[in-house]
Image (cartoon, grey):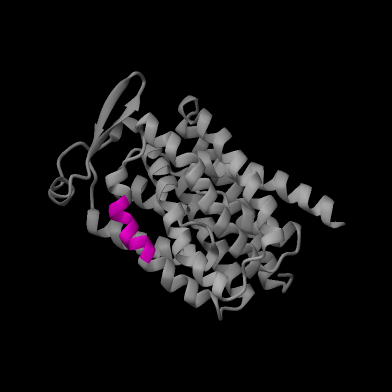
Amino acid sequence: MNNIIFTVFVYIGSLLAGFLGSLTGLGGGIIIVPMLTLLFGVDIHYAVGASLIAVIATSSGAASTYVKEGYTNIRIGMFLEIATTIGAIIGAYFAGFAPANIIAVVFGIVLIYSAIQSFISRKEDSLIISENKIASKLKLNGYYPQKNEWKKYSMQRVPLGFSICVLAGFLSGLLGIGGGAVKVIAMDRIMKIPFKVSTTTSNFMIGVTAAASAGIYLKNGFINPPLIMPVLLGVLTGAFIGASILGRTSSKWLKILFGILVLSLAFEMIKNAISGNL
């Protein structure tokens, strides 16, 4: 495969990753890393470096739209960003000396857990609106648009959710996934925030989380501009398309799509890591 064909295929794959990453709040990195390593044979450290830059682009492209439409809770995002930034810096330092197959296995395990969680459904009308003392004191509760009305929600189990977001940041720095997979689970499952608020707030956060660890990857020489260019352009285009149709999509089908795709990538990553093909 020559350089031009390689660049075109990477661009197309990144466009699809950005589209799905925007709709699910994952930032595209969760698809880009397996795509580059499994389909194109890119070293996982460089794939993670490219993914981190793409995650920043995805967050920048989609976040403004979601904020304007009223889905994103900026106050929650800024609060949880404290936890994810701390974790991201620790994860990026660890990735500098971690073997590729170990990173791939950890990546696969995270994907499997994320996929399983996405198949466990929770009804939208089961939202908890009773006031949580910590959330109320920090003014983290809010409203979001749902079927031509604004529905109230209350953030629950704040300390536990904050702790899990430290883990999300660590995985972002280690795996280049922006931490979106774990952030969405922490907000949607643990803190009982509506799914669309969770995904859009995750989109708002992941750019900052990725930027915290991208500097360390740059220092370690894992940022490759010729690889990053098609990834960046593709993800940014896909993110804008995804953001434009989010309001017309179903949370149920987003979760199913997310689960199937992530589960298939997880098994492929682990299989290749164990067989030494990475």
> What residue is rendered at 70% in x and 62% in y?
37
Q: Position of residue 215 (x, y in %)?
A: 50, 68
Asked if residue 79 is among those painted magenta in the image, a careful observer would answer yes
Where is residue 138? Give x, y as percent.
17, 49
In the picture, measured across the screen, residue 24 lies left or right of residue 223, that is left
Q: Position of residue 186 (x, y in %)?
A: 36, 52
Comparing 92 with 171, the one in front is: 92
Question: Where does residue 156 sit, x and y in percent of width and height?
Answer: 23, 48
Q: Is residue 62 above or below residue 81?
A: above
One can see residue 211 in this view: yes
Residue 19 in view, yes or no: no
Magenta stretch prevailing secondary structure: helix
250 within the magenta span: no
Q: Tell which residue pokes out farthest to the bottom in this image.
A: 97
- Residue 129: quarter of image: top left
Instruction: Tell which of 220 and 12 is nearer to you.
Output: 220
Write down the region rendered in magenta: 78-85
Which residue appears at 31% of the width and 55% of the height? 80
Identity of the residue drawn at 69% across and 51% down: 230
Query: For residue 170, what is the image quadrant?
Result: bottom left
Q: Is residue 191 above or below residue 248?
A: below
